[in-house]
Amino acid sequence: MSDTGDKITHFGFQDVAEDQKAGMVHGVFTSVASRYDIMNDVMSVGIHRVWKDAMMDWLAPQPHQRLLDVAGGTGDISFRFLKRAPGANAVVLDMTESMLVAGRQRAEAEQQADHLNWVVGDAMALPFEDNTFDVYTISFGIRNVTRVQDALSEAYRVLRPGGRLMVLEFSQLPNPALQWAYDRYSFNVIPAMGKAIANDRDSYQYLVESIRKFPDQETFASMIRTAGFDMVKYRNLSMGIAALHSGWKI
């Protein structure tokens, strides 16, 4: 095996070689792309929309900014950003082309076509020059990256001085009893929903496992600081089921 293949990471609760994970994640999102938006609404009872609006409220998009939306999938974050920032432009980047295809088919994509670009790419090796974007967002995607620290370093590289990172991701509830109840829902209900709605139990089993493997709020904030960001803060959403992390390139 190569040096990369000798390194081990996790794919949900499985240990896998680092050079295998991206392909496995790609398979998950290729499988669920056509039902991804419907499943988000069903799994969260629509609350993911409230979380994304909260993300925009804290981000406060400004006119003529340039956004890079990594793991942007079907475009939810970019659409919201462009509606709040007249004259802004957004690049939706995702490793899974079928997710981007699903996004381009949405009505918002046609309405905002002059301000949107869709790019297949890797969060750990972004195909952009240094100091290119004013804002970098990643929503429910960073936990799927093979090397999260590399992705954060790439975010820092492509942001202009004064640029802002904003991450929305599932997190950990500070109350053990609530976390226990949430885990019971996640592991028993969500894969079954995946089977019923998307005919894909295994992909949603992976997704709930990946949530439990992701670092807690303080640990992830420390990782953002390690990448070079300043003024790092986070806010819990729905008592910590999800969290927003913010950092600035000073």
Image (cartoon, rainbow, N blue to C red):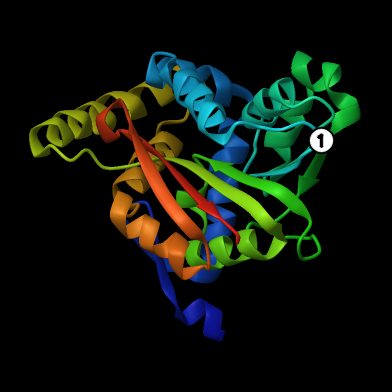
Residue receiving disc 1: 64
For the question of whether residue 200 can be seen, the reply is: yes
Which residue sits at x=46%, y=60%? Answer: 224
- Residue placed furthest toward the right: 114
Of 198 and 62, the residue lying toward us: 62
Numbered-mark total? 1
Residue 106, percent across and down? 74, 18
Q: Is residue 130 left or right of residue 210?
A: right
Task: Say what amino acid the circle numbered 1 marks.
Answer: His
- The residue furthest left is 177
Label 1 sits on a secondary structure element that is loop
| Residue 199, position as x, y percentages in the image | 48, 24
Residue 1 appears in the rendering: no
Residue sitting at x 46%, y 81%: 6
Q: Quadrant of residue 14?
A: bottom left
Mark 1 surroundings within 10 Å by alpha-carbon count, few (fewer than 14), some (14 through 19), many (20 or more): few
Q: Position of residue 38 (x, y in %)?
A: 53, 17
Nearest the viewer among 23 and 99 is 99
For this rendering, which residue is in front, 96 or 132? 132
At a point 21% along the width and 34% down the height, the residue shown is: 183
